Amino acid sequence: MERTDAFRTAFGILAAAALIATSTPASARPGPAGQGGEQGGQAPKLSPEEQAAMAAYEKAAKPGDQQAWLVSLAGSWEFEGTFWSAPGSEPMKSSGTAERTALLGGRVLREVVTSVMMGEPFEGIGHTGYDNVLGEFWSTWFDNMSTSLMTMTGHCEKGLCTYEGTNTDPLTGKPARARMTSRHEGDREVHEMFGPDPNGKEFKMMELVYTRRR
């Protein structure tokens, strides 16, 4: 995010907070020496622009159906994984667990994965949310096999999610494109990750089959 975008976002949050504060009835505001607020208990009248700004920020912040669906995925899961280092290579198998919890009033789903990869303990942390403004899901991932952050955005329809994003390629030091599909079948999920081979052609790198623990 560029600095101007960051400042704009921060200013917008502060503006929304200020509007909410000014819309609070004066009788509910603390006054001097334990007394009530301004006389008359009347809140300042908001201009049409202020009302529109408040409505926009409230809509952007309010959890909806997409966030509720993410919350429904919270709980304890276990998975079986298959990984390929190159097209046609011998697959590597692994298994592990995933603990999912809802954060920030049901706005974000956090996932902590533990497993063993190549004989070493593995831990990864992911966060998934839905951006009401952009109308798309977003996801971040980081683990103890890298110091980079993977970011992805995508859409879901009828239990099928498709994400696209980037992570840092250790060999080139440049962003590498990645694509992921997720099929949600109740207490079973299938996640597939695709990335470029040395020639830039996409191949399947990973498949994870999740099962909800009972």
Image (cartoon, rainbow, N blue to C red):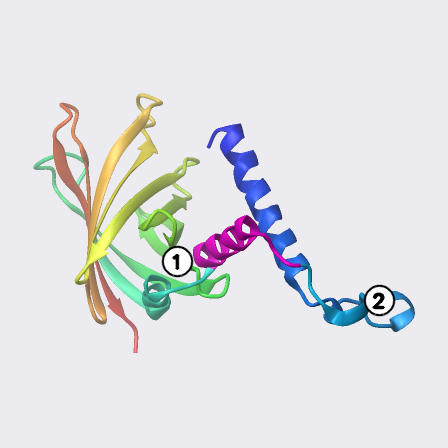
Q: Residues within 10 Å of mark 1 (few under 14, many from 20)?
A: many
Determine the main secondary structure of the stretch shown in magenta: helix
Image check: 20 left or right of 136? right
- Under circle 2, the secondary element is loop
As rendered, which of 109 and 81 lies closer to the eye?
109
Residue denoted by label 2: 31
As rendered, which of 207 and 139 lies closer to the eye?
139
Image check: 50 left or right of 97? right
Q: Which mark is residue 111?
A: 1
Question: Which numbered disc, 2 or 1, marks the residue closer to the eye?
Answer: 2
Direction bottom: furthest residue: 214
- Under circle 1, the secondary element is strand
Residue 72: x %, y % from top left: 33, 70
**Which residues make up the magenta segment?**
45-61
Direction left: furthest residue: 88
Residue 159: x %, y % from top left: 19, 62
As rendered, which of 195 and 72 lies closer to the eye?
72
Would you say residue 4 is visible in this rendering? yes
Residue depicted at x 31% and y 21%: 172
